[in-house]
Image (spheres, rainbow, N blue to C red):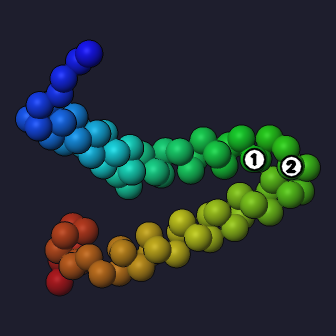
Amino acid sequence: MATLTFEQINERAVAFHAREAARNAPVAVARRAVYQLVSALTDLSESEYHDVLGLLWQEIAAPCRARQRRVHPAARGERG
């Protein structure tokens, strides 16, 4: 019968939490979302496909434009 020490249990718990944090990091979640979207798009008709991509573009472009407006002009290479 194998015996675990508290130190071994703690090491395993720390390793588990590190794996979960990496798995749920924003970039990992975004990657999974992209793969799920690509999979879902394959089941759509051509018009549905274009409608969904249009919606996606609106949802992505709006926050990007807002973020660009918040950036100081000098940071964008513009002169004040």
Which percent across, then down, holds residue 79?
18, 77
Which percent across, then down, holds residue 26?
38, 55
Q: Amino acid at mark 1?
A: Ala
Q: Vertically, is 49 above or below 2? A: below
At mark 2, the secondary structure is: loop
Which percent across, then down, holds residue 17?
27, 46
Q: Quadrant of the N terminus?
A: top left
Q: Residue 15 lies in what quarter of the image? A: top left
- Residue at mark 2: 44
Mark-to-mark CA distance, 1 and 2: 7 Å
Task: Return the residue nearer the eye: 6 or 67.
Answer: 6
- Residue at mark 1: 40
Which percent across, then down, holds residue 50?
80, 57
Q: Residue at x 52, y 75 (%)?
A: 62
Q: Residue at x 53, y 45 (%)?
A: 32
Q: Residue at x 28, y 39 (%)?
A: 16
Q: Is residue 17 visible?
A: yes
Q: Vertically, is 57 above or below 29? A: below
